[in-house]
Amino acid sequence: MSQPLIQSLQKEAEAVTAFGQLLTEERDALKGGDFQSLSGLLTRKVELGQALSRQVAAREAQMGALGMRPGPQGQLLGRNIDPAVGDAWRKLIFAARAARDNNQLNGAIVAAHLDHTREAINVLRQHSGGDSGLYGKNGKASAGAGGVSLASG
């Protein structure tokens, strides 16, 4: 009776673990400055996230039919919970927490990159006398570089 739920929990744990591995690849790309690979990783993360959403919905329906639900601290609540279901649930929770930790670490790395970029922009603004020497909304320099123009002869 609980075998289909155990299989669902195992499949979901495998998918969450795969998502965690993608997050590790993302972190390696961020740390290594390999920003080109981030687009492909994002595509894979979105696809896996969509598959995970479907698995979660199926698992929640199975749990509801068996009178089980997750508790506020991630524990499994219900009557007469099969020990194998409890074990599969703990593995899923462990995988989910590991993926969450990976995601938080990646967020901290992105925040550090953003802080570094903001600092670099501030340095550029200080050296150029304000915003006028930086880039406009179109991504191009809003004022020409100082010095003599080679085109003026």
Image: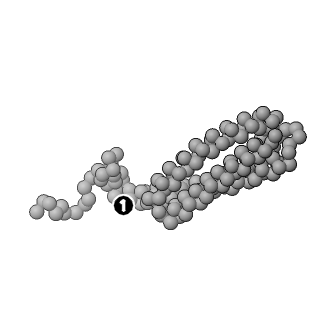
Query: On the rendered structure, is 144 left or right of 131?
Result: left
Label 1: how many Cα within 10 Å (few below 14, some 14–19, many 20+):
few
- Residue furthest toward the right? 80
Q: State the residue at coordinates (62%, 41%).
A: 53
Q: State the residue at coordinates (83%, 49%).
A: 84
Task: Please tell me whether mark 1 sits on a helix, a strand or a loop.
Answer: helix
Residue 44 appears anywhere in the view: yes
Residue 74 appears anywhere in the view: no
Query: On the rendered structure, is 1 left or right of 149?
Result: right
Which residue bears the numbered disc 1? 127
Where residue 25 appears, as percent x and y from the top left, is 56, 60
What coloring was used for the rendering? one colour
- Residue furthest toward the bottom? 32
* Image mark count: 1
User: Where is the C terminus found, in terms of image quarters?
Assistant: bottom left
Where residue 46 appears, as percent x and y from the top left, is 54, 47
Where residue 83 appears, as percent x and y from the top left, is 86, 48
Q: State the residue at coordinates (58%, 43%).
A: 50
Q: Amino acid at mark 1?
A: His
Where residue 120 appears, as percent x and y from the top left, is 43, 60
Which of 107 and 59 lies nearest the eye of the viewer?
A: 59
Which of 94 and 51 lies nearest the eye of the viewer?
A: 51
Query: On the rendered structure, is 136 left or right of 46?
Result: left
Which of 140 and 69 lies nearest the eye of the viewer?
A: 69
User: Where is the N terminus found, in terms of image quarters?
Assistant: top right
Q: State the residue at coordinates (77%, 50%).
A: 88
